Image (cartoon, rainbow, N blue to C red):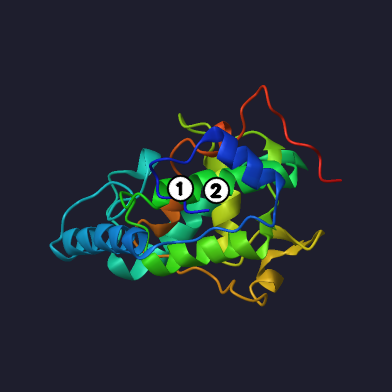
Amino acid sequence: MIPNGVDLTIDAVAEAARDPEIKIEITDEIRERVAASRALLDSFVAKGRIIYGVTTSVGGFVNWLVPPALAKNVQNNILCGVQSNVGQYLDDAYVRAAMLARINSLGRGASAIALENFEKYVAMYNRGILPCIPEKGSLGTSGDLGPLACIALVGIGQWRAKYRGRSCPARRRSNAPASSPWISASRRGWRWSTARRSCRAWPPASPPTPSG
């Protein structure tokens, strides 16, 4: 499956979510788009532009500028702050659907995610490393900051993930093949956890079959 950000259908997402054997392929064209988007953001930061969530904090702290030396810490703190969900963990199929929808969006090359992190996101999906996402709660107008933050936290070696049916701290999963932790810097954490993806991850009339 090639999630190019253009023609991925709901039916295709549902099929892939139910079948962990379906893997994602990333083309050179997708890589070029993602890299170009990141390069543009880097050029803006180098010029000293004030950009929400990149060189500033977010929400009520928007008026605070973030020094480059603290960018990584701020982005990681944002992820920890918006991960507010509670309750039982979502079924694996829902998690795969949310991850696939997000990868499809990032592949359009409009998010400024670093190519290395995008490729690690894809590798995490293909290896079957599934973040544990509590089913209740979130915050913000998009409605899914909490669930997507769970995914991003696993990417940086925090929170919890399932691998081959077992749940454990995500830091242990960073030793699994093709799953080295992502790197957080300007806007990387913020881009992983924005845009309405997980709340659209499954059509209401077609629920997934529980994985058990």
> Which residue occupies 17% across, 66% down?
46
Q: Is residue 14 above or below residue 56?
A: above
Residue 92 in picture, x, y percent from top left: 73, 47
Where residue 34 sits, quadrant-wise, is: bottom left
> What is the x, y in percent for residue 32?
29, 63
**Outermost residue toward the left in this view:** 47
Say what secondary structure mark 1 lies in: helix
**Nearest to the observer: residue 127 or residue 155:** 127
Give whichever of 86, 23 is nearer the camera. 23
Q: Is residue 135 left or right of residue 56?
A: right
User: Is 5 left, or right, of 155 in this rendering?
Assistant: left
How dense is the environment of label 2, judged by Cα within 10 Å: few (below 14), some, or many (20 and up)? many
**In the picture shown, does residue 116 fall above or below 79?**
below
Q: Are marks 1 and 2 in contact (CB under 8 Å)?
A: yes
What is the number of callouts on the image? 2
At 24% across and 49% down in the image, what residue appears?
A: 51
Query: In terms of image quadrants, where is residue 204?
Result: top right
Q: Is residue 45 left or right of residue 58?
A: left
Residue 135 in the image: state x and y as whole percent. Answer: 70, 37
**Amino acid tagged 1:** Asn
Question: Height in image: 91 above or below 118?
Answer: above
Residue at which label 2 appears: 100
Q: Residues within 10 Å of mark 1 (few under 14, many from 20)?
A: many
**Residue type, mark 2 in image:** Leu
- Residue that numbered label 1 is attached to: 104
**Closest to the observer: 63 or 203?**
203
Is disc 2 placed on a helix, strand or loop?
helix
**Residue plotted at (59% across, 71% down):** 179
Of all residues, the one furthest to the top in this rendering is: 205
Determine the CA span between mark 1 and mark 2: 6 Å
Residue 81 on image: x %, y % = 53, 48
